[in-house]
Image: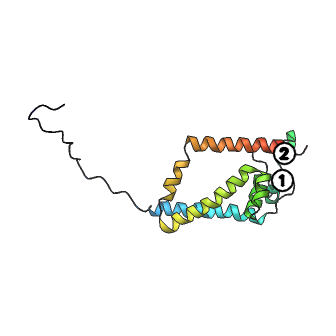
Amino acid sequence: MTTIGAPAFVPPLPRRAPGRVAIRVGIGARVGASACAVAILAVLSTAAWLNASPDGHGTHLQLGMFPCGWVMAFNKPCPTCGMTTSFSHAADLRFGASFLTQPMGMVLAVGSAAGFWGCLHVALTGSRLASICATMVRPRGLWTLAAGTAAAWVYKLATWPG
């Protein structure tokens, strides 16, 4: 409410001009993105090198790892059973077999491939894509990932032979 003769409200001037937003990320972020791209490429290359087990699980044994303790103790799959096999199928572009083996494995393999290209893009161009993608690592995204993992485990339990 104004009174007669009173000046209209004028907002105060800012004390200083707002800072500029960086268009490109710094060298540290680019090096980090390069390291992530190399790590993801190593995982996907290893998955492509492996021969997917026809049993739908156990491909990790080719890497010298131990058999799954859950399978040994309970004859039931653990939440990650079939992930290596699923990654191997996906790396060989057999997405149907990857999904049928372990649905979350296929989702993670495709996500890893997308992550590789995103990291490579950030490393080469300095794009701020990584900061945009980081918004997915919030409670809602993590709960969605956990729910997808649980659903894939239920699927794996339902399709487990024996």
According to the picture, the residue beneath numbered tag 2 turns out to be: 159
- Identify the residue at image location x=82%, y=42%: 157
Q: Is residue 139 left or right of residue 157?
A: left
Residue 56, labelled with which disc?
1
Where residue 113 appears, as percent x and y from the top left, is 65, 61
Q: Amino acid at mark 2?
A: Thr
Instruction: Give the camera-side residue of 110 and 48.
Output: 110
Q: In the structure shown, which secondary structural element does the residue marked by tag 2 occupy?
A: helix
Where residue 97 appears, as percent x and y from the top left, is 79, 57
Where residue 89 appears, as percent x and y from the top left, is 77, 60
Label 1 neighbour load within 10 Å: few <14, some 14-19, many 20+: many
Quadrant showing the C terminus: top right
- Identify the residue at image location x=22%, y=47%: 15
Instruction: Count up the numbered dots.
Output: 2
Quadrant showing the N terminus: top left
Marks 2 & 1, CB-CB < 8 Å contact:
yes
Q: Is residue 127 left or right of residue 69?
A: left
